[in-house]
Image: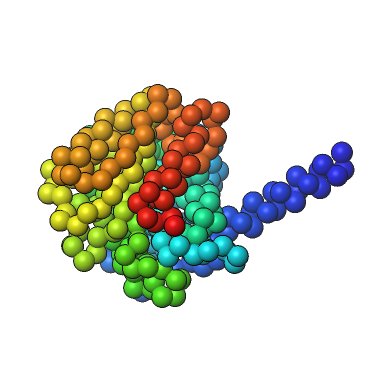
Amino acid sequence: MKNKLKILIALSMFVSISSKAQETIKLYEGKAPGSEDWTQKEAQMYSDLFKTEVVYNVTDPSLLVYQVPKGVKNTGTAIVIAPGGGFQSLSINREGKELATILSKKGITAFVLKYRLNKTETNDPAREMMDKLKDRAAFEKNSLATIQLAAKDGKTAVNYVRNNASKYGIDTKKVGIIGFSAGSTVAMETVLDNTLEQLPDFVANIYGGPRAELLNIKMPEKKIPMFICAASDDQLKLAPRSIQMYNKWLEADQSVELHMYSKGGHGFGTGKQNLPVDSWENHFEEWLKLQGFLN
């Protein structure tokens, strides 16, 4: 029994160590432009509602860097990971750090993005967001200014990775972004509302609900392959938006792959439910390899 306990402790320590970022990079010098007067303090807590750790009241955007471990071949690919949380919080582990650890061990340099969020007025950002979503139209309208700042953070993050490619052994033509839920809005903004020279090289949209206006924006001339994953039983009813974005890419003769699971709900991330949706990460890795980003 004692030996088993020692093994469990060792494993928990390994997970803790392996999921720790090697470096934290501030995206802006001084206060972030557009939110200079924000006074809320960034905090982190375990959400009983989301069953995972969340970060909230982000005012100072940053990147958590997960470099390719020693002994693993560096593919030259880099990815910015934008966690979700309804622009009220960030599901920092299940939609950020855990995926970053997995991908870094595959030879991809991963950067978890902590982008700006709506101010949390309570001590429970997840429940506060769910209350606000009872009037989704009002919530999206009231969040628009924050979404625009978060989108700016996403673009700045991609630019940082390219500008510092030599530092991390990154190929400047192999820089992508993946977003979960609200984070997918950040990711899609970097593709559909950006200058040509700042566009990422690939994008992944995981159970996202990008604002409707993005569907009407003209596709970029650059070919940007996209991976999409969602579940039909999404509690927030966002599955149709994944289909719409898939059709947009398809109609533009752009490379796109869609995985729509019957069950999985919203916010599954790297969590496990003993369902087929648990294998989405494997399909994502296969897609990266097919596109030439995981060779």
Q: Is residue 229 above or below residue 60?
A: above
Front residue of this view, candidates 128 and 178: 178
x 49%, y 65%: residue: 74
Q: Position of residue 236 (x, y in %)?
A: 34, 30
Specify whether residue 113 is in view: no
- Most extreme residue toward the right is 2
**Residue at 29% in and 58% down:** 201
- Say which quadrant the N terminus sits in: top right
Give the colour scheme of this rendering: rainbow
Is 38 displayed left or right of 195 in the figure?
Answer: right
Residue 111 to residue 204: above or below: below
Q: Give the total of numbered labels.
A: 0
Within the image, what quadrant is residue 255 found in? top left
**Residue 161 in view in this figure:** yes
On the image, the x and y values in percent for residue 70 come to 59, 67
Q: Is residue 87 above or below residue 70?
A: above
Which image quadrant is residue 245 in? top left
Q: Residue at x 29, y 38 (%)?
A: 209
Q: In x, y percent, where is residue 52?
A: 53, 41
What residue sits 41% from the left and 61% below the top?
Answer: 77
Side of 197 relative to 50 (left or right)? left
Position of the C terminus, as image quadrant, is bottom left
Q: Relative to the observer, which residue lies in front, 166 or 115?
A: 166
User: Which residue occupies the foreground of this view, 254 or 65?
Assistant: 254
